[in-house]
Amino acid sequence: MEKILIVDDDEGLVHFLSRFFARQEFDVRSCHSGTAALELVTADSFDLILLDYKMPGRNGLDLLREIRKLQVKTPVIMMTAYGTMDTAIEAMKLGAYDYLLKPFDRNDLDRLVKDALEVNRLMKEVVSFSPAGAGTPPDPRGAVKIIGRHKRMQEVYKLIGQVAAKDVTILITGDSGTGKELVARAIYHHSSRKEKPFLAVNCAAIPETLFESELFGHERGAFTGADRTHIGKFERCHGGTLFLDEISEMPLSTQAKLLRVLQHGEFERVGGSQTIKVDARIIAATNKNLEKEVQQNRFREDLYWRLQIISIHLPRLRDRAEDIPALVDYFVNRFSAEYQTPIRRIEAAALTRLQSHSWPGNVRELENTIRRAVLLSSGDVILEEHLRFDAACQGSPAGATGDDLWDRIERKLDELVPDLLQMCAERMHEGIIDALEKKLLSKVLAQCGYNQVKAAKFLGISRNTLRHRMKKFDLLPPSD
């Protein structure tokens, strides 16, 4: 259970926040003074601290300095009714994760807390690798390992060891699910920046209109809805490591600004004129061939060569099938401990089935398969009947129940809804339902080869309704 500390002299606010987080099953502690907060932080570790800016005696910024000495990696969110730019910038310089203006919106609070807790996990869950072999089960405190004895994985370990301590930009390539983020985190945990922030940015999940603001921040009034100064990922990550996942999805305009940061270590916030100096190590990852993206003018050539200083390529799981038994053992041990189930082993027939599978989703698909098998097993042995393969990786729903598919859809929606709400809140998009419907229709029509009868049946609507929707959204079949 994740632990949250609330420090504020407003007893009513502390009571509200304590109940708010307790309902979400967090372990909540609270206090009303800086002195009491330091006693708690000295005696115990926390996953997140919410800290008031203005309190009697020692103020929030002074307390933040002390907390940073005691718990370097714990995210701290400043809460303030004094939302000046100087307050925000000073808090960020001292290592705050972000700040909230009082009175704050519950959705903003919930989103920011979830983001901060994810950052906490990424920084504190140590990723290691074992050049000598497959490794051992994870440390019960949360460490994870990269597993594999195949010679191509040994080359990966060697590169991690050679470059982790050197302050260079690194590009990690490989298919989806091969473990690119794990490698990035392993580099971070073995680097000289391991006591500084590690922030991960999924470039594919950020709307193009919000990209620069997300990375570089914006000034108050920079655009409609910008009612406060926003500190971007680069400023938050000063002195640390910024992981740019799926960097091929970054817009060309933002790529130009990123190149400037890599070359000169400086940028301006959106709507600002002040040049901000930043020191952040960049680790980028992509599942696409960036050389082809450059040839097709979808990625800047100068940025590509800047990222290519050191490149680490991760093999597909089917190209190192000899590692499957070791990975299976690792995940069985890990999830048995996590879910407190008495799994001792996997039967031979089940292991043979796993070894014969093509694993289009790579290690992530194997991880999900073993997690489900551990949960479905009623005894101490995983049987072949407990194996359920990821439907999205199969090209058909074989092997997955309707409930499995809806669970996957709900998880995807959980990831997308915050971005959609943000777009609505900032009025960056009008008619969000129409936009989603148009995107869904275009995808289904393309999948069905623009066969309207088939598409209408797939969508559960009449052909006339489909025609009406196609006309409304100007969805014409491609010309021959």
Image (cartoon, rainbow, N blue to C red):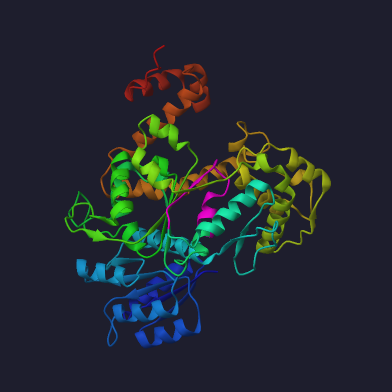
Query: Which residue shows up at 30% across the image and 66% down it?
Result: 100
Residue 84 appears in the figure: no
**Residue situated in front as seen by the camera: 325 or 459:** 325
337 shown above or below 444: below
Q: Nearer the viewer, residue 20 or 276?
A: 276
Residue 433 lies, in percent from the top left, at 36, 37
Is 115 inside the magenta-drawn segment?
no
Q: Is residue 284 visible?
A: yes
Q: Relative to residue 339, is residue 471 drawn left or right?
A: left
> Horizontally, is 300 left or right of 114 in the view?
left
Residue drawn at 21 percent across, 71 percent down: 82
Residue 184 against residue 32 in the figure, above or below? above
Q: Is residue 164 above or below residue 210?
A: below
**For residue 185: magenta?**
yes
Q: Is residue 264 left or right of residue 400?
A: left
In what quadrant of the picture does the C terminus appear? top left
Quadrant in the rendering for residue 126: bottom right
Residue range corresponding to the magenta coloring: 168-186
| Closest to the observer, 15 or 408 | 408
- Name which residue lies at 51% across and 59% down: 187
| 235, 46: nearer the viewer | 235
**Residue 354 pos. (x, y %):** 73, 43
Residue 434 in the image: state x and y as whole percent: 34, 34
